[in-house]
Image (cartoon, coloured by chain):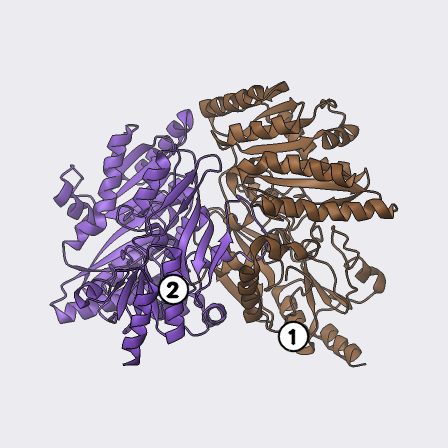
Chain colours: A purple, B brown
Amino acid sequence: MTATIALDDLVAALPDGAVITHPDIIAGYRQDRALDPDAGMPSAVVRARSTDDVVAAVRWCATNSVAIVPRGAGTGLSGGSSGVDGCIVISTEAMRDIHVDPVMRTATVQPGLLNAEVKAAVAEHGLWYPPDPSSFEICSIGGNAATNAGGLCCVKYGVTTDYVLGMEVVLADGRAVRLGGPRLKDSAGLSLVKLFVGSEGTLGVITELTLRLLPPQPAASTVVGSFSSVHDATEAVLAITNTIRPAMLEFMDSVAINAVEDHLRMGLDRGAGALLVAQSDSPGEAAAAEIAVIVDAFEANNASEVFSTDDPEEGEAFTVARRMAIPAVEKLGSLLLEDVGVPLPKLPHLVDGIAAIADARDVMISVIAHAGDGNTHPLIVFDPDDADQSARAHVAFGEVMDLAIGLGGTITGEHGVGRLKKPWLPNQVGEDVMDISRKVKAALDPHGLLNPGAVF
Amino acid sequence: MTATIALDDLVAALPDGAVITHPDIIAGYRQDRALDPDAGMPSAVVRARSTDDVVAAVRWCATNSVAIVPRGAGTGLSGGSSGVDGCIVISTEAMRDIHVDPVMRTATVQPGLLNAEVKAAVAEHGLWYPPDPSSFEICSIGGNAATNAGGLCCVKYGVTTDYVLGMEVVLADGRAVRLGGPRLKDSAGLSLVKLFVGSEGTLGVITELTLRLLPPQPAASTVVGSFSSVHDATEAVLAITNTIRPAMLEFMDSVAINAVEDHLRMGLDRGAGALLVAQSDSPGEAAAAEIAVIVDAFEANNASEVFSTDDPEEGEAFTVARRMAIPAVEKLGSLLLEDVGVPLPKLPHLVDGIAAIADARDVMISVIAHAGDGNTHPLIVFDPDDADQSARAHVAFGEVMDLAIGLGGTITGEHGVGRLKKPWLPNQVGEDVMDISRKVKAALDPHGLLNPGAVF
């Protein structure tokens, strides 16, 4: 009964319609794109329209010791926005303002705007926001900051944290605070902005971001190469990254090539063992020199077909193909989606090791990768109705992370730990780092209300 | 007596000669380059040669509740390495190993190596470590990480935090932990590496850094312009940064121009009100286009002389002139060295406001600046034997920070808060941010042993 009365207080503290309690709607907020089967059922969803709404919701949760699950667009791939039984989901999807300052070259953005919408809004001012997760058309900028999301151009242009100058965040006690701001350099006090980026909603709810923008990316030239073996392709990656900084360097294996070709019918080489798509966006002769390095690296590593173009639209078609890989492979079965990364020299070992795990567990693992920064997405495909295969897939999921850790790598390059990778985090970072992390978490959220299912 | 016995334990725990107790030598470790008159006298200096030495020293301090002041090369400009009475200074100046991995494009560096030595060591492998504080020939890489140091190329290439992938750090309880590592993307857990960068020795003692490296910087073209007024020069800065990303965009006022010319006699325009030095390092035709933008911006803002060169050595002479500015102005009297930054559009207001403060307080303030990122170094020159002038200089020192805060800026863009700027930090960031910062500090250093005089 107490809980019901208290929920009335929540409804009273927020604008009409902001608190959603209809079970069918709540059910849609229980999981993110990771579809964690263990996600709990929220007791309500708050669709915040302002920082004040978030403050009111967090205060109510703090007063009533109710768990808070922050949520952007719900496209997370590690289950970082999975429900906890009885929690309040605070959705920022309706917080969609943006203000671009072209002189300062910053955008002040509410968290619910999609990455693609941020890119479009700043492009109207002749500016560019680089980070480009493959899901950029459906993922929110707040979620990008919460997970320190990456993307395809990150190999040259860095990840989300490199573009977050400041934020407003609502703490576990309901205080809204501003961290950092529109200053290109700032050494005043602890780097709290950087601490909150990538903290997956465990330290606060992001209600505004100040983003650094760049002049528009120059038109890119693209090289596509087909390789008979994945090993040749990863050796070609190292030959390129040893010499230049490509603007993009993406990898797809044979399963991904064929799954994409099934959809797009763009003439990809179905017989290839791997495909690399590389770009240079350096200006003028410099692009030509970089393209030559890429072509040489492809040919020196036995590429069977090498196609290069300076037509941006033609190049974009291959980028689209790479972005399509996850949804295309998803048609083959249920997916366990990895995000493991390794120090670049270990990339061939990682790819070889994944193939060995797939063999040993008799499951299909398709590998796509932001190869140029060592960040791979092994996609473990399984039939959820085949209990034995599901079990083997889950074993392989853990083994791929163990493999990455053993190679000095990370269990997540850009998706975050969320729920699904939580058991492996201590193996990667060690107990001392877990201890420090828990102390920081406890200092800022002493009652453990913020996203209690995730990371820790 | 207890203290003396305990110091014997410290000596016993460390290699021969590592613990320095001679008063004359200790006195040299009392202050850094900020020469804080309120610095206390250490009871000993530990010249660590290894992580184990740092661990032993920190453990002894933790056991005996003795304050720890971490120290790199002692070139800090905010007093972040000022002694505390009875403290142990842990100097990392003798920890000087470096290992470069050219395939991974990283350097693993001990903290005592100088910035210039890091640059030189990685250049042998055809690689580049960008951050370049003006003091790069005398400042240590550990101190750079502790203050999140900037420099001249940061306007295009970012600051120290953008290049730190991982570190080993000794915590307040003496545990050595590894944060991050040689991975270009890593979203696993809280971003502790980024939290420790810029924490000015208040959270731990950095004993190793893993740095991201770039291919060599392309040869730069340089444009130098003389302006009759500082205001014209700052407007030219905005006209440039609105359009392109220069590789360098530095500002010197008339006092700095004349002080440098006194030393270098390179033919700078002694009658100019301000000088801008800008560079483009884009390849080929792109450099020519950027140089044209810079020349146009200079001429449109009434530059009286514009000189441009694509000879790197000729360009480097002007960079050296700009780097000489602080030591050259230092010859005119004692300095209070500011490091205030503002959002770029406010740069002209900041420079105008500083002139007004100099007038009102009847003190000389020479302004030099990393103008392209809004980070200025107003140098307040005073005669320490003139008590009244000293007092006015110190009032002006505070007023310049108040001015920057009022313009939405920062009290420190790249030097850190240290001792000297501590009273202004709450005014910039607010009490809530101070509260969070203190909680993080208390979580990691509950007894307040690490650099207790600084930041907080």
Res. B153 visible in picture: no
Please state the horizontal and vertical placement of residue B50, each as a whole percent of the image: 63, 63
Between B268 and B312, the one lying in front of the other is B268
Which residue shows up at 69% across the image and 63% down it? B453
Between A64 and B439, the one lying in front of the other is A64
Indicate the quadrant containing the N terminus of chain B: top left, top right, bottom left or bottom right: bottom right
User: Does residue A151 appear to the left or right of B134 in the view shown?
Assistant: left
The vertical placement of A43 against A365, above or below, is: below
Residue type marked 1:
Ala
Residue type marked 2:
Ala
How many numbered tags mark residues here? 2
Please state the horizontal and vertical placement of residue A194, each as a whole percent of the image: 48, 55
Q: Which residue is mark 2?
A: A56
User: Does residue A166 appear to the left or right of B257 in the view shown?
Assistant: left
Chain on which label 2 sits: A
Q: Which residue is mark 1?
A: B62
